[in-house]
Image: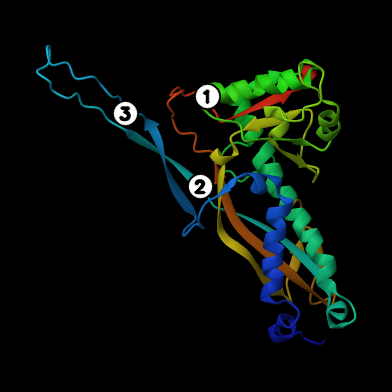
Amino acid sequence: MTKISRTDVDAVIETQVANEIFQGVVTNSKALQMFRRLPNMTSDKTKLRILDSLPIAYFVDETTDNGRKNLTKMAWANKYINAAEIAVIVPIKENDLADADIDIWAQVRPRLVEAFGRKIDDAILNGVGKPTDWRKGLIPSIVDAGANVTETGKLYSDINDVMTKVEESGYNVTGLVGGVGLKGKFRMMTDTTGQPLQSTEIGSLARTFVDNGTWDKTLATLVAGDFNQAVYAIRNDITYKVLTEAVIQDPSDGSILYNLAQDDMVALRVTMRLGWEIPNPVNALNETETRFPFAALVPEETSL
């Protein structure tokens, strides 16, 4: 059997290819598009210092305390971004790699982008399949905070009520996110006077539509919030390793899917590591534990 060397494969897999894959993941993952990126992680855990209490200022009373200034304090709590690995293995026939007339990576790249983006969004937005040391998903966290509004059929008023939930927590709404089905509702949405949105505050908000199949409309119609308050960090950009003699098993039952040596195949293993968090610091308007920078509009029949 002809053995493909690493040098042979490196002629196909260039550094530029890996960079394009990473940029594609960010584009395809709506969560990473909306969230604020922090500097890359230098270890598998990054500590975030979160403001936990605010200072209090006092007037100085010369008549009762001899003009002495009162003391105050500020406190910080810790939250952590834990890096988790996401990976995919793509088996390819050796003959296909050897065929210079076939642009293998033009076929592979879009599928890698789709798989990574979908997995990241499902974990971040819904908490589905998330790593054990990641925080709860965005929508489950909104449920825990009680920051949900039930639909009334009047979308403009409903969005206003959702935004009010965020504002009562001391945050300004910077955008809205929902499924693709929300597009049609926005096109038909009018303000309280029956006029198209045009220059209203709601009409001017950034809108993101999750089009990779991960938005569960039974859980939420849309989410509004201050997306600067959701952050993520990369531990490792896209890395790759070519496997030439491995056995590829189904993780669910251990059955052998491919024996690369026997099947005259190679496999490209692609990985990246990242984590995310919602710091949610105290602010001048709300120092309670129930504050949260996001709120959701939920269907009436499945009110959270």
x%, y% of residue 188?
Answer: 86, 27
Look at the picture and state if 41 lies above or below 160: below
The numbered disc on residue 169 is 1
Precedes in sequence: disc 1 or disc 3: 3
Q: How is the image coloured?
A: rainbow
**Residue pointed to by mark 2:** 81
Residue found 81% across the figure and 61% down from its top: 110
Per the image, label 2 sits on a secondary structure element best described as strand
For label 1, the crowd category at 10 Å Cα-Cα, with few meaning under 14, some 14 to 19 and many 20 or more, is many
Observer-nearest residue: 64 or 134?
A: 64
Precedes in sequence: disc 2 or disc 1: 2
How far apart marks 1 and 3 lie (CA) works out to 18 Å
Precedes in sequence: disc 2 or disc 3: 3
Per the image, label 3 sits on a secondary structure element best described as loop
Q: Which of marks 2 and 1 is in front?
A: 1
Q: Which of marks 2 and 3 is in front?
A: 3
Q: Quadrant of the N terminus?
A: bottom right
The numbered disc on residue 55 is 3
Residue found 83% across the figure and 79% down from its top: 97
